[in-house]
Image (cartoon, rainbow, N blue to C red):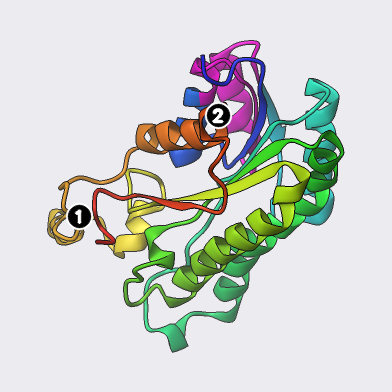
Amino acid sequence: MRLAGKTAIVTGGASGFGAGIVRKFLAEGARVMIADINGDAAAQMADDMGDAAVAQTVDVANGDSVQAMADAALAAFGHLDILVNNAGVCHQPGPLEDVAEDEFDRTLIVNAKSVYLTARALVPHMKSRKAGTILNVASTAGVSPRPNLNWYNASKGWMITATKTMAIELAPSGVRVNAINPVAGETPLLKTFMGEDTPEMRAKFLSTIPLGRFSQPEDMGNAACFLCSDEANMITGVAMEVDGGRCI
């Protein structure tokens, strides 16, 4: 029970990697807010997970919605130990100059601005307690980018840099900040990354992953649990690749 007594928010927690993180945190003893733009899915998952889980509808691209999430978490838990910025989107693959402006804006707002908004809402609380852990779910795309996902790659590179500078600034306040870099996984975004979900396209993607499989939500849950637990008390500013060797 490595997270016994801990409280956490996981954005985008009702599906994909976020759901894997939620399940692992709950199994390790944490109380978790499942925060998702799909409020019905979050509520259903919270019902399925039991009393240690609560649901919250949130649009991480909207400051008022993020503040409402923070307020609800503090009201439910009394304090917050862990914030996982997992919610993310991707534009359709294609030449960088052909990506529509609204797709570009949505990608940067959801993947980058959300980290600013959650920090604005919750870092003061963590500073006041001289404790806290923030985990940003970035991507191998921010380290070893694929073509035709240019602005998504850039948003995840931004997230990795934000993680490192947040870690430096918040260390004196007792707050740790890390990231995990998944490779493409069995989540709702997989088809978007590949452009089309066919056996041939899957084989092409898998050929770039030395361990020969996609990331699973459980893989992200295990890595997130470690980085957010007291076992990682000396680790901050790390962007851990959970990618089967993709970035080597």
| Image marks 1 and 2: residues in contact by CB distance under 8 Å | no
Q: Looking at the picture, tell me which residue is in the foreground, 73 or 104.
A: 73
Query: What residue is shown with label 1?
Result: 209
Q: Looking at the picture, tell me which residue is in the foreground, 18 or 129.
A: 129
| Image spot of residue 219 (x, y percent) | 35, 36
Q: Residue at x 53, y 24 (%)?
A: 25
Against 26, residue 186 (above or below) is: below
- The answer to if 28 sits in the magenta stretch is yes
Label 1 – label 2 distance at C-alpha:
28 Å
- Callout 2 environment at 10 Å: few (<14), some (14 to 19), or many (20+)? some
Q: Residue at x 33, y 47 (%)?
A: 185
Question: What residue span does the magenta drawing correspond to?
Answer: 25-53
Query: What residue is shown with label 2?
Result: 229
Q: Quadrant of residue 192?
A: bottom left
Q: Residue at x 20, y 59 (%)?
A: 205
- Callout 1 environment at 10 Å: few (<14), some (14 to 19), or many (20+)? some
